[in-house]
Image (tube, rainbow, N blue to C red):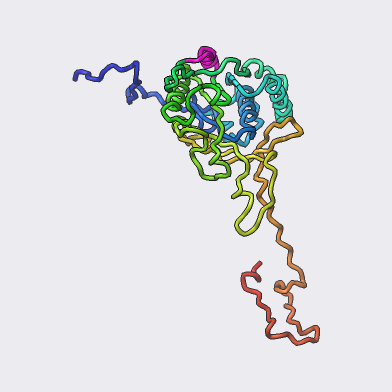
Amino acid sequence: MEDTVMETRDLFNRVSLTTTRDETRLRWVLPGLLQHTVGLIVGAGGIGKSFLALQLAADLATGCATLPGLFGPQVLADDQLTWGGLRVAGVFAEDPEPILAERLQAWFRRAAVMPGADPRLIEKHLDHNLFLTTASRPPIWWDVSGRQVLRPGPAYDELTRLAQVHDLLILDPLSLFHTGDENDNMAMTLVMNHFNEVARQYQCTIILLHHIAKSSRGSQDSRDVGRGAVAITNRTRWVWWLREPGEGQQTGTKKRKPQIPSDVWLQLVPQKINYPGMGVVGQQWLQRLKDRGGVLACVDNPLTEPKKPRPAPTLSSRTGTKGVKQNSGKRSGRKQDPKKQDTTTEADADR
């Protein structure tokens, strides 16, 4: 039969059994973040998104996991996760060079004392694989007409050059790399489409850092946590939310738990994972190590109360033990008040 399928290779790539006979293995940059896609890290201003992004970038560029709780031993051992040796570029538009240098030094001091770490090898990988810079000429896309018609801006060529030679590109924050109306869904759809096209065309994963919506602060269940139009989160397939401990987790309905300082303890929540394959992790607690330059560390839930050990039974216990006669109150010479009879239940006696 004559093939009547139209040639539309410029717009569409056809997927069929014939073209996919060889097994296609998914590749991951971070747990749940597929290669050559766009992801978001959202959080309130000043909460630590930039430091977290820099720390993740250095971990991936060197293979030294200073945040092992975000990956887990099974993920680190699986070759489907692109772990270590990635070429990573981070463009931080809000932080000056001295701050970036200070944070990188703090990360290196932390990495150098991790189990099995080789400081010389780590430094070599950093110099070869990690490129950190400030944004000297944003934005990437410019609204020249005021009608949400975006055109390449002054930094567009620099972005494409970075995407061509790096596996992962981190841009912080999203709002400084475009001039579109952040609350306009059509404008933000165009912006996010442009980022997705760059990721696809240049085979480079992109992580955008974005501020949180004011209405999401303190919320535990909101899905569109990012500020502005919902198109920002809708056009991504991976969102991590860095937040302070929520009120619902600091206090219980019956028993009040102690407050913890939000400048020390943070939560990293996988808010949106469209491809929940290998490598997806759950909610992770982080601690900011102030005595080590503010570097983040994965920790256990600080609100979990340790279980109290059950006291060992004694001869004077009311319930008694096997072979020990219970105290009925007769030895003291006093008659037991029937109104104060022993109300010990069988469940208590079994303890």
**Image coordinates for residue 58, horizontal then vertical, percent:** 64, 24
Per the picture, the main secondary structure of the magenta-coloured stretch is: helix
Q: In the image, 143: left or right of 338?
A: left
Give the magenta part as a residue range. 152-166
Figure quadrant of the C terminus:
bottom right
Of 225 and 268, the residue lying toward us? 225
Q: In the image, 98: left or right of 230?
A: right
Of 263 and 59, the residue lying toward us? 263
Q: Is residue 71 above or below residue 82?
A: below
Residue 244 in which image quadrant:
top right
Residue at 50% of width from left, 22% of height from top?
179
**Image coordinates for residue 279, horizontal then vertical, percent:** 53, 34
Q: Residue furthest front?
A: 146
Residue 158 in which image quadrant:
top right
**Image coordinates for residue 77, horizontal then vertical, percent:** 58, 31
Q: Residue furthest left?
A: 1
Of 27 and 204, the residue lying toward us? 204
